[in-house]
Image: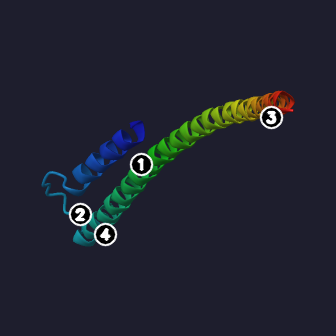
Amino acid sequence: MEFAGRLIEVRCALLRMSNPPAQNTGAAEPVSVDLDAATRRLIAALDALESAVERRSEADRDEAELASRIQALGVDRSRLADELDGSLVKSRRLERANREIADRLDRAIATIRSVIDTGEG
């Protein structure tokens, strides 16, 4: 904000210069007109510069906000990747347990059938 403050100080000084107290010095009128025109152009340039500084400041804030959002997305991505890894491990464990249970059931069914077959014969 120091830059913006300096711009305001310069603008005020230029306005004071372009509107000096009325003096009867006998100075030529064209010099005063040229000075007024140059002062107005300088004030307009300073206004444009101040606008550019404000736009740049806003762009920097937007960039910082975007960087913050990207960082948050990165954190979320890492958390989701960890959760996915955990889910994959759990899923593989459940598949293994399911296969073991299916094998045990198949053996139990085979044993029961053999007992039934032996009892009938």
Q: Earlier in the sequence, mark 4 or mark 3?
A: 4
**Along the line of sight, which residue is nearer the eye, 95 or 38?**
95
Residue plotted at (25% across, 69% down): 33
* Disc on the earlier residue, 1 or 2: 2
Q: Nearer the viewer, mark 4 or mark 3?
A: 3
Q: Residue 11's spot in the image, x, y percent?
A: 30, 50
User: The disc labelled 1 sits on which kind of residue?
Assistant: Glu
Q: Residues within 10 Å of mark 1 (few under 14, many from 20)?
A: few
Vertical side of 67 occupied by 100: above or below: above
- Number of the front mark, 4 or 1: 1
Mark drawn on residue 34: 4
Q: Residue lying farthest bottom?
A: 30
Q: Label 2, secondary structure: give it.
A: loop
Q: Disc 3 or 1, which lies upstream in sequence? A: 1
Q: Which residue is mark 3?
A: 106
Instruction: Please state, as top left, top right, bottom left or bottom right, where the N terminus lies in the image.
Output: top left
In percent of width and height, residue 14 lies at 29, 52
Question: Mark 3 and mark 1: span between their CA atoms?
Answer: 70 Å
Indicate the secondary structure of the residue bearing disc 1. Answer: helix
Which secondary structure, mark 4?
helix
Mark before the other along the chain sequence, 2 or 4:
2
Q: Which residue is mark 2?
A: 27
Q: Which residue is mark 1?
A: 58
Report the side of 47 relative to 63 (left or right).
left
